[in-house]
């Protein structure tokens, strides 16, 4: 039975969908492993210990599931780097505008 992700994401809302996007690669393997692994997963999840979660589940994942997880990790790293770059560029733009504004004020004696 296929999971209706669109329906689940609609119900979850924005924050819930962000969490589900993070957990999605782990769900198929969680359905196969035993209750003790599931309990450990929950403990590590509440501790936000992603390294331990990966150690716990990676060996039980299929090659395709590992590929999906790896792609998600690489995409998240790319997005974080891109966001950092954009924030840096925005800061530069704001600082340039401030410097130009101060230079105009200084050169016009505060008239502009």
Image (cartoon, grey):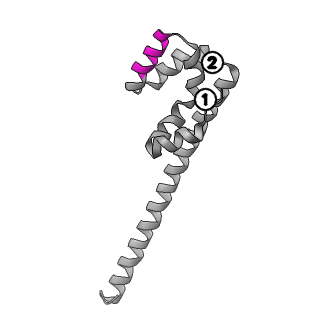
Against 10, residue 65 (above or below) is above
Q: Is residue 10 left or right of residue 2?
A: left
User: Would you place residue 15 above or below residue 38 in this image?
Assistant: below
Which region shows up in magenta?
35-44
Q: Residue furthest right?
A: 64
Asked if labels 2 and 1 touch by Cβ distance under 8 angstroms, the answer is yes
State the quadrant of the C terminus.
bottom left
Residue farthest left in this picture: 110
The one nearer the camera, 64 or 54, is 64
Q: Image point 62% across, 18% down: which residue?
A: 61
Q: Residues within 10 Å of mark 2 (few under 14, many from 20)?
A: many
Q: Residue at the spot x=60%, y=35% of the render?
A: 72
Q: Examine the rendered structure and indicate whether residue 87 appears above or below residue 61.
A: below
Q: Secondary structure at mark 2?
A: loop
- Residue at the disc numbered 2: 61
The Cα–Cα distance between marks 1 and 2, rounded to whole angstroms, is 10 Å
Count neighbours of disc 1 (C-alpha within 10 A) and say few if under 14, some if 14 to 19, many if 20 or more.
many
Q: Where does label 1 land, which residue?
A: 69
Identify the secondary structure beneath mark 1: helix
Q: Nearer the viewer, residue 61 or 32?
A: 32
Q: Is 2 displayed left or right of 99 in the figure?
A: right
Q: In terms of image quadrants, where is residue 81?
A: top right
């Amino acid at each position: 039975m296929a999971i209706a992700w669109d329906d689940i994401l609609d119900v979850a809302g924005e924050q819930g969908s962000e969490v589900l996007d993070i957990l999605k690669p782990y769900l198929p393997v969680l359905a196969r492993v035993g209750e003790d692994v599931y309990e450990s997963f929950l403990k590590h999840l509440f501790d936000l210990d992603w390294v331990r979660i990966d150690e716990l589940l990676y060996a039980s994942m299929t090659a395709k599931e590992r590929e999906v997880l790896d792609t998600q990790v690489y995409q998240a790293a790319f997005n974080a780097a891109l966001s950092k770059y954009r924030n840096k560029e925005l800061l530069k733009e704001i600082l340039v505008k401030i410097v130009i504004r101060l230079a105009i004020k200084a050169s016009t004696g505060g008239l502009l």
